[in-house]
Image: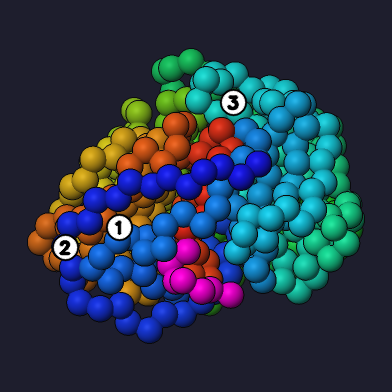
Amino acid sequence: MMMPQRIFLCVFFSIGSVSPSFSEDWPHWRGMARNDVIAENSGWNGGKWPPNGEAWRINVGIGCSSPVIVEGNVYITGWRNNRDTVFCLEAATGHELWTVGYACPKYGRHSTGDKGIYAGPTSTPAFDPETKRLYTLSTDGDLNCWNTQAKGKRVWGFNLYDRFQVKQRPDVGRRSLRDYGYTSSPLLYKNWAIVEVGDDEGTVVAFDKSDGKKVWTSECKDEAGHTASPVLMTVEGVPCLAVLTLRNLVVMRLDKDHEGETVAEYPWATDFANNIPTPAVVGDSVLITSAYNHYAMCRVKFTLKGAEKLWENENPSGVCSPVVYKDRVYWAWRGIHCVDLNTGQEIWRGGKVGTAGSCLITQDERLMIWADNGELILSETAERSPKKFTELAHGRSLFRSDAWPHLVLANGRIFVKDREGNLACFALKATVR
């Protein structure tokens, strides 16, 4: 159902003109490069922003899953009436092209705690440009592969709880138990669909992306964190995977004959097991952060022989994944922050945002933030405003529930969503493909 357009923007001042833009898809969690640094311009020209207002709005059902955008289509999951549904929408109009659904509970079978602030699918789909297949993971562990060229025909799928007998997450820290079901996103690499399963066989399991057969399991057997998603990195020329489990940051190998072997572990446990932000990879180092009893951000360097802490500060993000750009680290959590990548020292902070939020950096070096109950904010990065936080535009209260789903910018369009399943699109140009 399409909703009336509504946006209320306050524009503060103009700085220069917009440089030539690039366009790219957003095929998986955190964008093309998996780091929230995007080869797209912000659309800022000193006037109204977004310059063309709201293009369309639709509700896809409850859930914190983020959209992916590929070849002019939007793929997104949502929950209603005891079913998860995968939607394929036309990016330009929001028109529904096809849907496919299956029976699924509102919460994972072992879920406990915080049920008033989340429900339905949280994992972001992953699109394979080689096969045009889409991979989704439900909160109750339904891992599915869909053929997007055949209106979402199911290629293969199974339930991780049923197949691996995954147990409820244990108590971690000094507070009450939390289990949110499966929330991290599948990662496609080579011929594998890599998932943080959390089984006694291995924390991470790689499945053949063509048929779902198990290929390898990780040496690490920690309980799955089920929140932060796994990320790719390279250590001394060796392809690796970084995973934030319930208790550790684990780096494991992905090269032939060493798949899943642990390179090193760095202890990182948080009350409620809430290691939520996805690690940010910087060369052979990784940024991790959390709140609660482990109120910190830390940069850890890895070699094939071990791990070394480079720095740790008391300036964390509890939810938003850190974004690294030109020796600066940015995030939106209880304010908008910028720190020095090499030292962890604060450069500036500002803005008024709470605990729900995500951000990205555009090709014209602006910071775009989606937060709270629908605050869409554009600000300068430290490249343009090195001494203080500088806000350019602010759209307020676009939705009425938490902005847990990640902000997306793809092919000249901004896509934002809340946990109630309201999805809106803003065009940065009058005409975009």
Residue indicated by mark 1: 378
Task: Characterize the local packing of mark 1: few (<14), some (14-19) or many (20 or more) Cα atoms within 10 angstroms.
Answer: many
- Specify the amino acid type for callout 1: Leu
In the image shown, does 397 or 55 lie closer to the viewer? 55
Does 402 appear above or below 288?
above
Mark 3 burial class by Cα count in 10 Å: few <14, some 14-19, many 20+: many
**Dot 2 alpha-carbon crowd within 10 angstroms: few under 14, some 14 to 19, many 20 or more:** few
Give x and y (percent) for residue 286. Answer: 41, 58
Taking the magenta stretch, the answer to whether it contains residue 79 is no
**What is the spatial separation of the Cα atoms under label 1 and label 3, in whole angstroms?**
34 Å
Start-end of magenta stretch? 427-433
Residue at 62% of width from left, 49% of height from top?
A: 124
Q: Magenta: predominant secondary structure element?
A: loop
Residue 409: % across, % down: 48, 62
Write down the residue under mark 3: 179
Q: Quadrant of residue 256?
A: bottom right
Q: Is residue 91 left or right of residue 402?
A: right
The image quadrant where one finds the C terminus is bottom right
